[in-house]
């Protein structure tokens, strides 16, 4: 005799519902026991009746089974978190890769490459970008040139100041060197003039000396 298929839905009759619960509870506990023995599995089964009565089965200890279950759930949650982080990192990497590709395409277009398929509006946008870029480049260039000119002017002022100080120092040293030889020359000139005044005229005479007449002093 073929059994008919039972429709799975809540049994409205309370007595029938209680009878069905008892039968299926015992069958479920039996199946849990058989599974633990035949397959050497750790099985834990907890059942609460409609009246909140507890029925349980465990192949080892229901507390240890629950602890193991909670530990496993926690580890699985961490793994799920890691998987979620990995997926987020992959998505971020993919987004960055796309941005880099877009930047490379824009760079090529700014260099005048790959613009065959560009429309007039895209070409106008590229032209505007280039003009803005050139304006910023010129501003920065002129700024650097002004800074360099100011730097050169400052160096020029320092060199002029240093040159002036060296000239003044050289003039002071030259005055001392010139004053010393002039004093020596003046002393030499004075000695020469004195020697010239002290010269005596001499003459050469041949023959006996002329008698000198002595003057008599009157008495």
Image: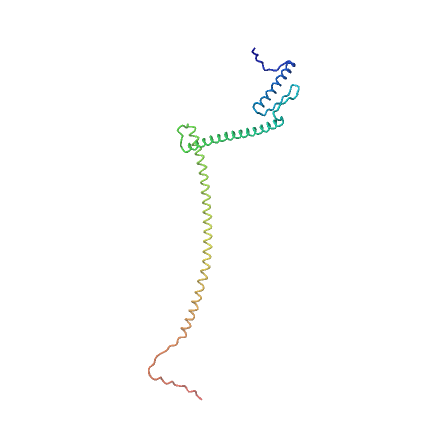
When the figure is inspected, residue 11 is found, relative to residue 156, above or below; the finding is: above
When the figure is inspected, residue 189 is found, relative to residue 166, above or below; the finding is: below
The image shows a total of numbered marks equal to 0
Return the x and y of residue 149 as percentages of the image width and height: 45, 45
Which is nearer the eye, 147 or 192?
A: 147
In the image as oriented, which residue stretches furthest toward the bottom? Answer: 219
Quadrant hosting residue 3:
top right
Quadrant where the N terminus lies?
A: top right
Return the x and y of residue 74 as percentages of the image width and height: 58, 29
Q: What's the colour scheme?
A: rainbow
Return the x and y of residue 99 as percentages of the image width and height: 47, 31
Quadrant where the C terminus lies?
A: bottom left
Which is nearer the eye, 163 or 83?
A: 83
Horizontal side, residue 70 vs residue 162: left or right: right
In the image as oriented, which residue stretches furthest toward the left? Answer: 206
In the image as oriented, which residue stretches furthest toward the front? Answer: 38
Quadrant hosting residue 130:
top left
When the figure is inspected, residue 104 is found, relative to residue 219, above or below; the finding is: above
Return the x and y of residue 14 as percentages of the image width and height: 65, 14
């Amino acid at each position: 005799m073929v059994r008919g298929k039972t429709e799975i839905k809540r049994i409205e009759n309370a007595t029938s519902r209680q009878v069905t619960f008892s039968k299926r509870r015992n069958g479920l506990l039996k199946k849990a026991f058989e599974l633990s023995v035949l397959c050497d599995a750790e099985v834990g089964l907890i059942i609460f009746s409609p009246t909140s009565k507890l029925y349980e089965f465990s192949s080892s200890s229901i507390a240890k089974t629950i602890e193991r279950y909670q530990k496993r759930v926690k580890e699985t949650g961490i793994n799920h978190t890691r998987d979620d982080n990995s997926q987020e990192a992959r998505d971020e990497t993919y987004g960055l890769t796309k941005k880099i590709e877009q930047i490379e395409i824009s760079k090529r277009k700014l260099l005048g490459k790959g613009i065959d398929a560009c429309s007039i509006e895209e070409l106008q946008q590229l032209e505007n970008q280039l003009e803005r870029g050139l304006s910023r480049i010129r501003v920065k260039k002129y700024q650097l040139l002004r800074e360099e000119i100011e730097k050169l002017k400052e160096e020029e002022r320092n060199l002029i100041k240093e040159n002036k100080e060296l000239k003044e120092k050289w003039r002071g040293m030259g005055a001392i060197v010139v004053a010393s030889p002039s004093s020596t020359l003046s002393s030499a000139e004075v000695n020469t003039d004195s020697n010239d005044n002290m010269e005596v005229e001499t003459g050469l005479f041949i023959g006996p000396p002329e008698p000198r007449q002595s003057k008599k002093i009157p008495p």
